[in-house]
Image (cartoon, grey):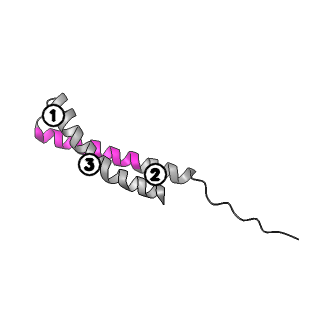
Amino acid sequence: MNTMLVFTIMMIVLPIFSYFFSKSFIFEGLFGMVHSSSYFYAAAVAIAIVHVILGMFIYVAWTEDSRPIPQFKAD
């Protein structure tokens, strides 16, 4: 449950932050792009972040230890 909460918060916060950060500071500030071009590239960065988070969630879910199977006593 804790893992799901962490990834849910990451899925909400990180794409929004990366969109506005990359649009304002990287594409418009550093590269000097016009507003119409920076929207497109910032959206691509946010989509890439979403895919990275999904990949991390799948990896963590796949490698997460499952509950041990109880051993039944065989007499």
Left or right relative to 33: residue 65:
right
Q: Against 7, is 40 above or below?
A: above
Q: How far apart are marks 3 and 2 (CA)?
A: 18 Å
Work out whether mark 3 precedes mark 1 in sequence or the reverse, and give the earlier one.
3
The answer to whether residue 6 is visible is yes
Q: What element carries label 2?
A: helix
Query: Given the image, on which type of amino acid does mark 1 rest?
Result: Glu
Residue 12 percent across, percent down from the top left = 31, 54
Question: In the drawing, does residue 65 fall left or right of residue 57?
Answer: right
Label 2 amino acid? Answer: Phe
Instruction: Return the mark for residue 28.
Output: 1
Q: Distance between the residues labelled 3 and 1?
A: 17 Å
Within 10 Å of disc 2 (Cα), the crowding (few <14, some 14-19, many 20+) is some
Asked if residue 38 lies in the magenta stretch, the reply is yes
The one nearer the camera, 73 or 61, is 73
**Where does the magenta region start and end?**
35-53
Task: Kindly identify the residue that appears in the image at 51 percent across and 50 percent down.
Answer: 60
Query: Mark 3 = which residue?
Result: 16
The residue at which mark 2 appears reads as: 57
What element does badge 3 sit on? helix
